[in-house]
Image: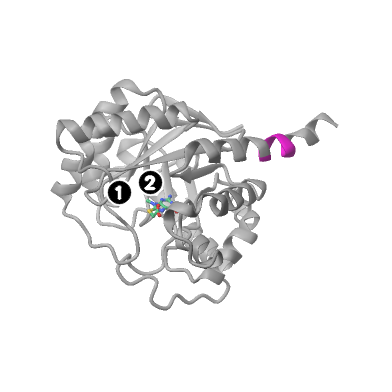
């Protein structure tokens, strides 16, 4: 039985859980700093919990392909007031989506209980800070850097290569003194992967169970859905995303990261009910 302790707020991973995405970037609904955007973020957080979110992932830097990096101060200004406001009121754990050590520290001080790092703690000082903060960490695989990662991604065997990378980051965490119980893994859909790489990773997601750590997946609204479904726009990718969420859960995913909490929570609950019915026989 796996229970994640996110700075006092817990998540029971004996059934699959939903992580709701709350972007606090100027290209989303607000920029986080002022009262109006803080209230808007709080509203959105309340709605996502009402819809079935078990965790909330708050990020202030876009990691979309081609996105530009933002400064540390800018990222802090966007997310810290939002994390403080949400942590004070909302009972579910808050995950901070960042790769910067300083932002990790300030976010956890402000009430975040999990670090979601698309760089898997490779940035300067990140391993040491994560160890000191004592909260769980999601280690995600990315090939290359956000600005250029979709140019020409190459793998020998995408699942084996991603597994080897994640294993090496787990080893780095263990060497730093971060206990295994605090780690989650993510193959990083769309991060330096072709459509074929993404489809293979999802089809063979059960192979990550060899690492014996909870697996988180984020496929919600991603371009792999658009690419399969005749380039439908982002706002029409929910059915494709639900298909992927269900397939991920069937292959052992512990947490599904999504923009569309209500529909995803229902699809995942249904899939889990079918899976769990085996235990009645
Ligand atoms: C993922 C993620 C993004 C993901 C984890 C988007 C921050 C792009 N994708 N974190 N972040 N896994 N752990 O479309 O797949 O949401 S940003």
Please say if 121 is above or below 52: below
132 or 105: which is nearer to us? Answer: 105
Q: How far apart are marks 1 and 2 (CA)?
A: 6 Å
The spot of residue 229 in percent (x, y) is 55, 64
53 or 155: which is nearer to us? Answer: 53
Task: Give neighbour class at mark 1: few <14, some 14-19, many 20+ (Cα, 10 Å).
Answer: many
**Are dots 1 and 2 in contact, CB under 8 Å?**
yes
Residue linked to disc 1: 98
The mark total stands at 2
- Which residue occupies 64% across, 60% down? 203
For the N terminus, the image quarter is top right
The spot of residue 178 in percent (x, y) is 41, 43
Residue linked to disc 2: 116
What residue span does the magenta drawing correspond to?
A: 271-275
Left or right of residue 21, residue 166 in this image: right
- Which residue occupies 45% across, 26% down? 50
For the C terminus, the image quarter is top right
Verify whether residue 158 appears in magenta.
Answer: no
Res 113 → quadrant: top left
């Amino acid at each position: 039985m796996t229970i994640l302790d996110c700075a006092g707020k817990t998540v029971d991973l004996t059934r699959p859980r939903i992580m709701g995405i709350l972007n606090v970037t100027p290209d989303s609904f607000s920029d986080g700093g002022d009262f109006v955007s803080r209230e808007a973020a709080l509203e959105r957080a309340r709605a996502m919990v009402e819809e079935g979110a078990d965790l909330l992932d708050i990020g202030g830097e876009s990691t979309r392909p081609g996105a530009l990096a933002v400064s540390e101060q800018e990222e802090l200004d966007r997310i810290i007031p939002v994390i403080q406001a949400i942590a004070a009121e909302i009972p579910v754990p808050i995950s901070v989506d960042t790769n910067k050590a300083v932002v990790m520290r300030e976010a956890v001080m402000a009430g975040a209980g999990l670090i979601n790092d698309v760089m898997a703690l490779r940035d300067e000082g990140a391993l040491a800070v994560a160890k000191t903060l004592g909260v769980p960490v999601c280690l995600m695989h990315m090939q290359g850097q956000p600005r250029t990662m979709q140019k020409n991604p190459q793998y020998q065997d995408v699942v084996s290569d991603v597994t080897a990378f994640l294993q090496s980051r787990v080893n780095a965490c263990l060497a730093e003194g971060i206990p295994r119980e605090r780690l989650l893994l993510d193959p990083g859909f769309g991060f330096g992967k072709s459509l074929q790489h993404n489809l293979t990773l999802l089809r063979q997601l059960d192979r990550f169970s060899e690492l014996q750590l909870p697996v988180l997946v984020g496929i919600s609204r991603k371009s792999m859905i658009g690419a399969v479904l005749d380039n439908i726009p982002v706002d029409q990718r929910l059915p494709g995303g639900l298909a992927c969420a269900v397939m991920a859960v069937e292959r052992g995913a512990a947490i599904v990261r999504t923009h569309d909490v209500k529909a995803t929570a229902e699809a995942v609950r249904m899939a889990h009910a079918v899976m769990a019915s085996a235990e009645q026989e």
